Amino acid sequence: MSETLHIGKTLQRIIKNSKILCLVDGEHYPPVTKWALDHLIKNKGIIKALFFLGGTEKVENAFEELKSKRIDYRIYKSEKNKKIDFELFEEILKTKELDIVVDLSDEPVLDYSRRLKMASLSLKYEKSYLGSDFFFQPPQRSKILKKPSLSIIGTGKRIGKTAVGVTVARLLKNKSFDPVIVCMGRGGPEKPEYINIEKIDISAKTLLEVVEKGQHAASDYWEDALLAGVSTVGCRRCGGGFAGNPFVSNVIKGAKLTNSLKNKFVIMEGSGSTLPPVRTDQNIVLVGAGQSLRKISGYMGQYRLMLADLVIVTMCEEPIADEQKVEEVYKSIKKVNPDVDIALTKFRPQPLGNIRKKKVFVATTAPGKIRDKILNYLEKQYSCEVVGYSKHLSNREKLRKDLDKNLDECDILLTEIKAASIDVAAKKAEKMDVDIIFMHNEMKLTGGDIKNLNEAILNIGERAKRKK
């Protein structure tokens, strides 16, 4: 067998005793396809069905030729104008008797794009997807939460996931959902750490003390606790796969901890494009309007969209994304998940303290091209004077240079919560006797399918409750 089966010992072990749906086409001679099926059987794979994708290059009646008296399997066939019937594929995947999809097709029937769509649909229904030299398995989604829950899932980094998480938590808190947030940052604690907001008053001083202890004071669970005013559980993860599975994490332990807390609702917050390895009742998926369409609705971005109960598109404004780009993003999401509600939004800074009539230094991660909108909004909305600005919270060296220019002329350092905002900016402000005020990036609805963003988010929370 080793002379002809080229998938390697690891993938051979995966096939063994698995219930298989095979993807086949008419570009291969039917006897060759049957020969491949024989090898799957010799490897103790259990073939339950074939899905004929199309193609009649080798023989006109390939579909009929694929029927076999030697193997008991059903054959499904695409009938959609000679294109792959993805709706039929989904119906097949819903059957509980299947474990894995084995791809025996090739170009031109399955190109990169269509193959990744087949993989994403397989993972959506928690079936593995295996081919000649690749293997996608569904991200872990452990059923351990005993309370109503939702996940906040991102399609990338730097698209406002923490800001959205804070907004969601605030809304649920104000409506007596009593939420706790479980975070999974790349700088999280070795053991899950519970921040009880009722027993600790979080301030700039608190975070500076955390830094002094050698800990990561800007980890998401500290940021969420301070900005949202809710209790949090801090976890860590390393690595992230195509479909969002972390390589290693302590999130399962962190999620289990929530079962013993008095909080009544759980928010699982992803990290970048990595998903929480825990099943929740609802999923909010976050998309950045400035991302490429391929990343949003192609590759494995489409898998994340398939999981969505609500999609929030952030940064829907120029110069990040013009009206045409936002419309393209909207349509690309609908193409993947036609029934999902989409909220188009933009961010505006919201200080957590009084900056009225003050001279302010603003530190943020927002790109320089949106600088003027942020500064003009702050000066108009809060009647302050912006004297200094830095977009370099992710670059300590450049941040220090920006602070050196004119922090000494300011009354207040107004900053997002990032690592450098604590161990560089806040430290310097404290030494110079400049007050430190943190800010939240508040979502503003700009369009989409819904009229009221707050109501849409609260509806997601109510749906999660009903599922329990």
Image: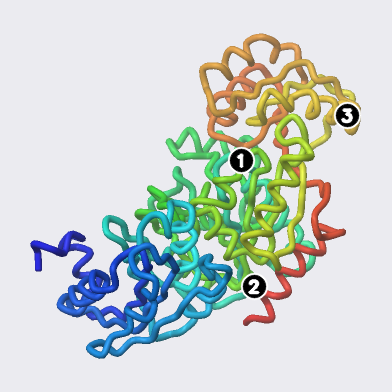
Q: How crowded is the residue under tag 2: few (<14 C-alpha within 10 Å), some, or many (20+)?
A: some
Which numbered dot is residue 225?
none
The residue under the point 63% across, 14% down is 402
Reading the image, the residue beneath label 2 is 264
Left or right, 447 with reference to 228: right
Q: Is residue 358 left or right of residue 5?
A: right
Going by the numbered disc 3, the residue's amino acid type is: Arg
Q: As drawn, is 436 to the left or to the right of 256?
A: right
Rendered residue at 51%/67% (across/down): 84
Looking at the rendered structure, the secondary structure element under dot 1 is loop
| Mark 3 and mark 2 residues within 8 Å of each other at the beta carbon | no
Q: Residue 152: name its quadrant.
A: bottom right
Q: Quadrant of the C terminus?
A: bottom right
Look at mark 3 in the image and give the residue it sits on: 356
Q: Which mark is residue 291?
A: 1
Q: CA distance from mark 1 to mark 3?
A: 35 Å
